[in-house]
Image (tube, grey):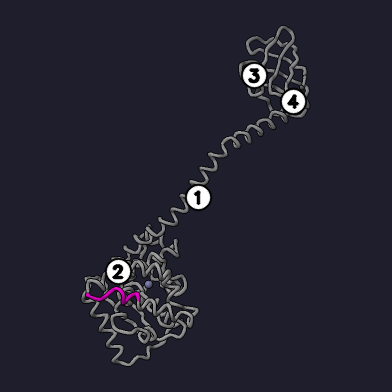
Amino acid sequence: MIKVSAYYYDGVSAAQKTVEVTFSPGGAAWVSGDGVHFSTSLDQLQIESRMGNTPRNIVLKQGGKLEIADNDAIDQVCAHFYRRQHHSWLYRLEKSYPYALIAAIIAIAFIWGAIEWGVPRLAKVAANAIPLKAEENIALEGLKTLDDWVFEKSELDLQQQRHLQKLLQQIESNLNSDYHYQLKLRSSREVGANALALPGGLIIMTDALFHLAENDQQIIAVLAHEIGHIEHQHGLRAIFQSSVGALLMAGLLGDVGSISSLSVTLPTVLLESRYSRAFELEADDFASAYLTSNNIKPERLIEILTLLSSQQSTNSDFDYLSSHPAMEKRIREIEKP
Ligand SMILES: [Zn+2]
């Protein structure tokens, strides 16, 4: 309890009445004396800030005011009052904690969803908006970097090279595609037996893969798989997904002119980040559909994938298996009728 003397003005007459104000710890205030008797609560009082030792006014919301000279006592009341406010704020928060938690979970889920679904979707839209010519330029720049980085000239003889080119032409003639497919043959100690799909229709195949394959149909299966990556624009989409900034640039500003700088990230995406499992399954799907409709058993794809995965131990850096993850699942998918 804090008890202070005060002057009371009722706000109607100019009369000054001497009263006592008692503040209870519960937040009530009793005003009594000189014919005045009423109680109110602290939140009905508007206490002015302290100005040195000049008497302080407390305005009553119901009308009228109190004038109190004992500033220290009022400070005490204020300290109590504000602590109470603080308490009630905490109290409210505690009470609403489950709601705050739910709101936080929804917010996190929304952000996660935006990244998980929004970015890939936006990447797909952006990739679709890229003109074919720009796509080809990105691929050529990417190829240059890859040639500096991991690839050397193919050591296959001219006849072998021509044969492989013919296999690709054969596939292309069976497809109704906007892309003009090109096969770039390379040798590489680091990459081993491998094939890569660059945007714009560019496919790289290593000599080691040619040697590993047991027959043409297995090579056709690999080429069809890589074509699947290109048809679904996996290279571009992977670049966009790895660079949200570039994605926004292309998707929102329509600035495709500066997109060729994206080719810088292409080799990294192809060799290090690898394609996602979803992209691999999509390319497998494309390949097995192609094989089936051209009277080649989809098993040829399983065979070459198995061969590629069995040579992974010799190539720990760039193994085909890690770029083509979850073999068992993929084989099951290909085997599906
Ligand atoms: Zn693949």
- Label 3 and label 4: CA atoms lie apart by 15 Å
Quadrant of residue 28 in the image?
A: top right
The amino acid type, in three-letter code, at marker 1 is: Ile
Q: From the image, state whether disc 1 or disc 2 is nearer to you.
A: 2
Is disc 3 in contact with disc 1, using a CB cutoff of under 8 Å?
A: no
- Of the image marks 3 and 1, the number of the one nearer the N terminus: 3
The amino acid type, in three-letter code, at marker 3 is: Leu
- Label 2 and label 4: CA atoms lie apart by 81 Å
Q: From the image, state whether disc 2 or disc 4 is nearer to you.
A: 2
Q: From the image, state whether disc 3 or disc 1 is nearer to you.
A: 1
Using the image, tell me which numbered label, if any, was put on residue 74.
4
Using the image, tell me which numbered label, if any, was put on residue 286.
2
Q: Report which residue position mark 3 lands on.
A: 60
Magenta part of the chain: 295-302
Disc 4 on helix, strand or loop?
Answer: helix
Judge whether residue 143 can be spotted in this image.
Answer: no
Q: From the image, state whether disc 2 or disc 3 is nearer to you.
A: 2
Judge whether residue 221 can be spotted in this image.
Answer: yes
Residue 67 versus residue 202 in the image, above or below? above
Q: Report which residue position mark 1 lands on.
A: 108
- Of the image marks 1 and 4, the number of the one nearer the N terminus: 4
The amino acid type, in three-letter code, at marker 2 is: Phe
- Of the image marks 2 and 4, the number of the one nearer the N terminus: 4
- Label 2 and label 3: CA atoms lie apart by 79 Å
View extreme (top): residue: 35
